[in-house]
Amino acid sequence: MARKQKSLLYTFFSLGTACTMIYLLGIHAFRKSLLYFRTIY
C-alpha cells in the first residue's frame, strides 16, 4: 500500500515538474516571439 502511494506521489511530482517546465518554456518562447514581432513591425 505504501509503495503504491509512493509511486503515485512520484508520478504526480514528475507530471507537475513537466508541466512547470513546459509552462516556463512557453512563456519564454512567447516573450521571444513578441520581441521578434516588435522588431519586425
Image (spheres, rainbow, N blue to C red):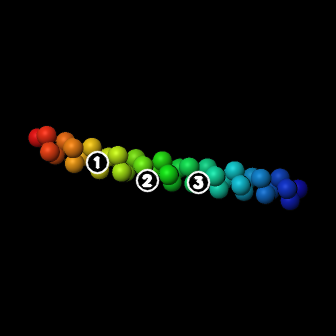
Residue at 21% from the left image edge and 44% from the top image edge: 36
- 3 or 1: tag closer to the N-terminus: 3
- CA neighbours of label 2 inside 10 A, class few (<14), some (14 to 19), many (20+): few
Q: Position of residue 40 (x, y in %)?
A: 13, 40
Which residue does the numbered mark 1 point to in the structure image? Answer: 32
User: Which kind of residue does numbered mark 3 sit on?
Assistant: Gly
Q: CA distance from mark 3 to mark 1?
A: 24 Å
- 2 or 1: tag closer to the N-terminus: 2
User: Which kind of residue does numbered mark 1 sit on?
Assistant: Lys
Instruction: Classify mark 2: helix, strand or loop.
Output: helix
Quarter of the rendering occupied by the N terminus: bottom right
Q: Position of residue 32 (x, y in %)?
A: 28, 48
Residue at 56% from the left image edge and 49% from the top image edge: 18
Instruction: Classify mark 1: helix, strand or loop.
Output: helix
Q: Position of residue 3 (x, y in %)?
A: 85, 56
Residue 10: image quadrant is bottom right
Which residue does the numbered mark 3 point to in the structure image? Answer: 16
User: Which kind of residue does numbered mark 2 sit on?
Assistant: Leu
Quarter of the rendering occupied by the C terminus: top left
Which residue does the numbered mark 2 point to in the structure image? Answer: 24
